[in-house]
Image (cartoon, rainbow, N blue to C red):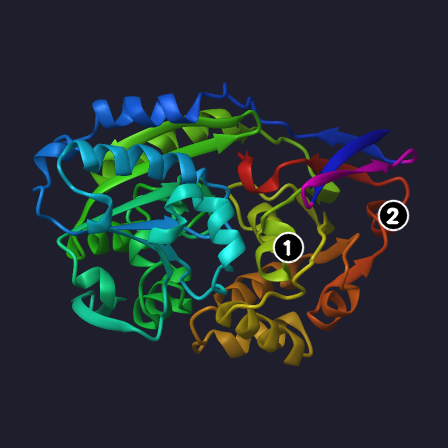
Amino acid sequence: MGFELPLGTETVECSLPSCRVTTARPPGGEAVDVREAARDALRDPHGPPLTDRIEPSDSVSIVVTDVTRATPEDVLLDVLVAAFERAGVDSDQISVVIGLGLHRPMTDEEIESALGEHADLAVNHDPDRTVTVGEIEGCPVELFEPITETDVLCSTGMVEPHQYAGFSGGAKTALIGAGGESQLRYTHGPEMLARDGVRLGRIDGNPFREFLDSGGDLIDVEFCLNVTHGPAGIMGASAGDHRAVVRDLAATAREALSVEVTAEYDAVVAGVGAPKDANLYQTTRGPTYIVLGARNPLRPDGRVVVPATLSEGAGEGRGEQRFYERLSAASSPEELYQEMKDGYEPGAQRAFVLARTLREHDVWITNSDTPEIVEECLMHAAKGVEDAIEPESDVLVVPDALNTLLV
């Protein structure tokens, strides 16, 4: 049986004629016109309209997502900046901060491509240039210093399934994307990630999400404009109070992305595609979403297979390099898991979560530019998907693993 999977910005054809293949495709929902949906969201926001939250003399910071998120930032900024200008705030009073967290800085070309005519307003977040603005649960909360010098903080974002937060978006873009190592260390540490409720697709009763929401209040995220997406494209937009925006779009996403799974499989083939499959750090979201989600569909000896370009190798940012250093130095997943239970550097959490996954199942990365890095990191490399799956296997194909909730 033949099927297509994403590989970078293109697709790869796969065929497993001796295997029994099932495909998990979520309902998908319907695509919307992003600009119209964003304008509608601003006209009918959660909470007061933007014009009631700002003064013409205010300086404004808008935190946007980086290259690891497929957010239509140019359109969202068009709509937001136009709304500010109608309220009397000139463009020279607005700064755009790219929320990197500990990812690599975006290049000038990437910024121009992502932000269009607003690229000249943008600056990359610098995690070494932060100030402490308060604390939550004893954790100092640090924020990019230029943001603290403006009057109003807004953010864009993508509400999509997230391994720890349940769904991303809302206050996360600013609190984590433009934050310091302190809250990254706390929220992504082993104690937080081991708590009940910290799970893919879950918002209510999720301590990680609760920290983000409290953090959004502390740093005063005044207004959010977020979107959500599925197989058909952008499925909706929501604006206003950060908590309500996440819950609004998470409900849309959950309905569109959930697939019920009742059987067990020898292998799951997980599609990731661009922009996430550019490096190993982001690509490993595929197997961890499968294994550590609400419903692990694998038999005890099953494996996850992911085609990925890995054009950036392990990844170039501080967090990606810490991930690579931990994995490449370890002799086994069990050793790494036990070692990291005592703590680790911010950014290395993906190595910890991957170690949890690898304790239970093998992971194979195929079609990549850097198979040697895959092998260094406790995983297996193969030329193609067909080379990574045993004949006569029961196989579940999840073409869009990061946007499919197996339940």
The amino acid type of the residue labelled 1 equals: Ala
Residue 101 horizontal/vertical position (percent): 40, 62
**What range of the chain is rendered magenta?**
8-18
Q: Nearer the viewer, residue 168 or 96?
A: 96
Q: Which residue is mark 1?
A: 278
Residue tagged by mark 2?
390
Number of marks present in the image shown = 2
At label 2, the amino acid type is Glu
Camera-side mark, 1 or 2 = 1
Q: Tell which circle, 1 or 2, labels the residue nearer the N-terminal end.
A: 1
User: Which of 9/391 is in front?
Assistant: 9
Label 1, label 2: how far apart the Cα atoms are:
27 Å
Can you give x and y, in whole percent of width and height, for residue 147 in the image?
A: 23, 60
Secondary structure of the residue carrying numbered label 2? loop
The residue lying at 72 percent from left, 43 percent from top is: 269
56 displayed left or right of 16: left
